[in-house]
Image (cartoon, rainbow, N blue to C red):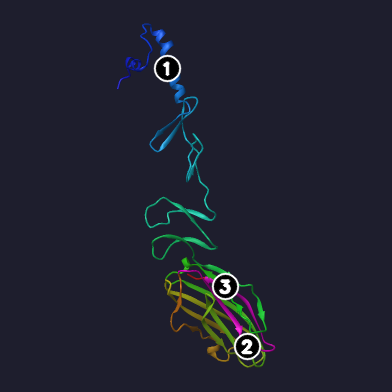
Amino acid sequence: MAFSVTRLLRKVPVAEQLKEIGTFINRELLPYLHELRESLSNAFVGFGSDTIIIADDGTAERAALTGDVTSVQNSNVTAFRTFSAKSILANATNADAIPTELAATRAYQVPRVNTANTATVMQVIGGVSANGSNPDATNAATNLSVGGEYTVQSEEWEDGTCFEFFGTYVFVEPAAPPTLTVEILIAGVVQETMIITSTAAAGTRGGQIGGYIRNLTLGSSGTCMLTITRLNNHGSTEDQRSQPTLSVAPVTVNTTIANTIQMRIRMTTAVVDATLTVTQGFVRKAF
């Protein structure tokens, strides 16, 4: 549409009919424009979802940005908002969505897609999870932890998940040594046991023990299979030196909650001059 001075002037309110253009400009047009300018100064004008600030000098400026992306007024420099500690920006859902924070809650966690392929979660994939305060020695029927106690969070249980124990020990035996008891506990309850019977001969010997917890099914009545392994130089037979023990039937585990897991060893009974020392050990999520 062409610009029309006549049309503009017709819209200017006048108190009376003026014949001279100079008089009209000085008495009516200029005061009207000044009043209009004052009205627009520092006003907020909305354009859809955006807001424009009219500054004192009559220029239009963008308002400050708040939310996930921030910026001061009339600046092109933007920045992310403050995020939680140990978090990343991710779309953790199973559909297109605006990303948000995904925070780690414990050591060794990394982002990964869950077993159901429905979400991105923070989980411990593998690596050392717990270490015992070894060496730890006793000359009584005292339980010695192999690698310490590890708490498995509910999100760490997955179909096929495997937790591994490993430790070494030194056994100072008298002529009539006691048997050694090795156990795996889940949530404080003994779920698998191995008894090692030693050769009846005094001496300083030792060995290594290991164990596995392998998840089979998930849920409040989830199931696992357990195995304890041994390799030593004091067993009374070849089986006592190297044969493993394993679950005859699956063990029930509630995988919807956190559970502690632990392997321990002890002298079944206290015997004079017998000393058992766990020299090292660890617990880890193997896969």
Q: Against 59, is 98 above or below? A: below
Above or below, comparing residue 140 to residue 187 in the picture: below
Query: Which residue corresponds to the image point at 53% horizontal and 83% vertical from the top-left?
Result: 193
- Residue under numbered circle 3: 149
Instruction: Tell which tag, 1 or 2, sits nearer the viewer.
Output: 1
| Label 3, residues with CA under 10 Å away: few <14, some 14-19, many ≥20 | many
Give the residue at mark 2. 269
The residue under label 3 is which amino acid type?
Answer: Glu
* Label 3–label 2 contact, CB within 8 A: no
Q: Label 3 to label 2, Cα distance in Å?
A: 23 Å
Label located before the other in sequence (1 or 2)? 1
Q: In 3D space, how far apart are the residues under numbered discs 3 and 1 (Cα atoms)?
A: 83 Å
Residue at the (42%, 63%) spot, across then down: 114
Give how far apart the Cα atoms at labels 1 and 2 are.
Answer: 105 Å
Report helix, strand or loop for mark 3: loop
Is 11 on the left or on the right of 170, as rendered? left
| Image-quadrant location for residue 198 | bottom right
Q: Nearer the viewer, residue 13 or 54?
A: 13
What percent of the width, then of the height, locates residue 8? 35, 17
Q: Which residues are magenta?
A: 256-284
Q: Secondary structure at mark 2?
A: loop
Pointer 1 residue: 32
Q: Residues within 10 Å of mark 2 (few under 14, many from 20)?
A: some
Disc 1 is placed on an element classified as helix
Mark 2 residue type: Thr
Question: Was residue 178 drawn as part of the magenta stretch in this picture?
Answer: no
Looking at the rendered structure, the kind of residue marked 1 is Tyr
Rendered location of residue 101, percent (x, y): 48, 53
The outermost residue toward the right is 273
- The mark lying in front, picked from 3 and 1, is 1
